[in-house]
């Protein structure tokens, strides 16, 4: 059980390091966010199994994570349609 918690913390840390580092593409940033959400999901799952709780909160978390992924993809598609690519250097962020 401790190995699983350590692995989930390592996944969360690696996802945050990818998110914080400077990347040119928005798709890599969105994939790192989904990796962070996946590590939080696994942590939530282990915590709920450990304390013998119901998994209703896990379903709510999955619904919100799917909505977050759909929002990120819609932003990516609108950015590609507007600017022609998903480079951060191609547009001015104020």
Image (spheres, rainbow, N blue to C red):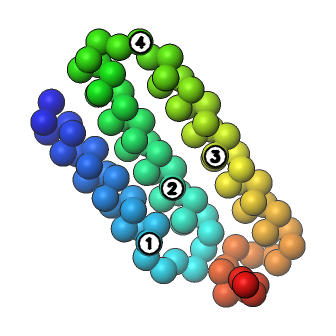
Residue pictured at 43% horizontal, 51% vertical: 36
The quadrant in which the N terminus is found is top left
Residue pictured at 14% horizontal, 39% vertical: 3
Q: From mark 3 to mark 4, how far is it between C-alphas?
A: 23 Å
Relative placement, left or right, of 33 versus 27 is: left
Q: From mark 1 to mark 3, how far is it between C-alphas?
A: 18 Å
Q: Position of residue 64 (x, y in %)?
A: 61, 36
Q: Which residue is mark 3?
A: 68
Assess whether mark 4 and mark 3 are in contact (beta carbons under 8 angstroms).
no
Assess whether mark 2 and mark 3 are in contact (beta carbons under 8 angstroms).
yes
Residue pictured at 62% horizontal, 69% vertical: 26
Q: Which residue is mark 1?
A: 20
Relative placement, left or right, of 9 versus 90 is: left
Q: Of the residues tagged 3 and 4, which is closer to the observer?
A: 4
Relative placement, left or right, of 44 versus 59 is: left
Image height of 45 relative to 11, above or below: above
Q: Which residue is mark 2?
A: 33
Q: Position of residue 80 (x, y in %)?
A: 79, 69
Given residues 81 and 2, the one toward you in this image is: 2
The quadrant in which the C terminus is found is bottom right
Assess whether mark 3 and mark 1 are in contact (beta carbons under 8 angstroms).
no
Q: Residues within 10 Å of mark 4 (few under 14, many from 20)?
A: few
Secondary structure of the residue carrying tag 2 is helix
For marks 3 and 4 on the same chain, the one whose residue lies earlier in the sequence: 4
Q: Residues within 10 Å of mark 2 (few under 14, many from 20)?
A: many
Q: Which residue is mark 4?
A: 54
**Residue lying furthest right:** 82
For marks 2 and 1 on the same chain, the one whose residue lies earlier in the sequence: 1
Q: Of the residues tagged 2 and 4, which is closer to the observer?
A: 4
Q: Position of residue 9 (x, y in %)?
A: 26, 49
Q: Quadrant of residue 40?
A: top left
């Amino acid at each position: 059980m401790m190995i699983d918690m350590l692995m989930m913390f390592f996944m969360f840390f690696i996802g945050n390091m990818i998110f914080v580092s400077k990347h040119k593409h928005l798709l890599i940033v969105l994939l790192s966010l989904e990796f962070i959400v996946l590590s939080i999901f696994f942590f939530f799952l282990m915590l709920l199994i450990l304390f013998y709780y119901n998994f209703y909160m896990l379903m709510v978390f999955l619904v919100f994570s799917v909505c977050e992924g759909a929002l990120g993809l819609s932003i990516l598609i609108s950015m590609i349609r507007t600017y022609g690519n998903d480079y951060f250097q191609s547009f001015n962020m104020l």
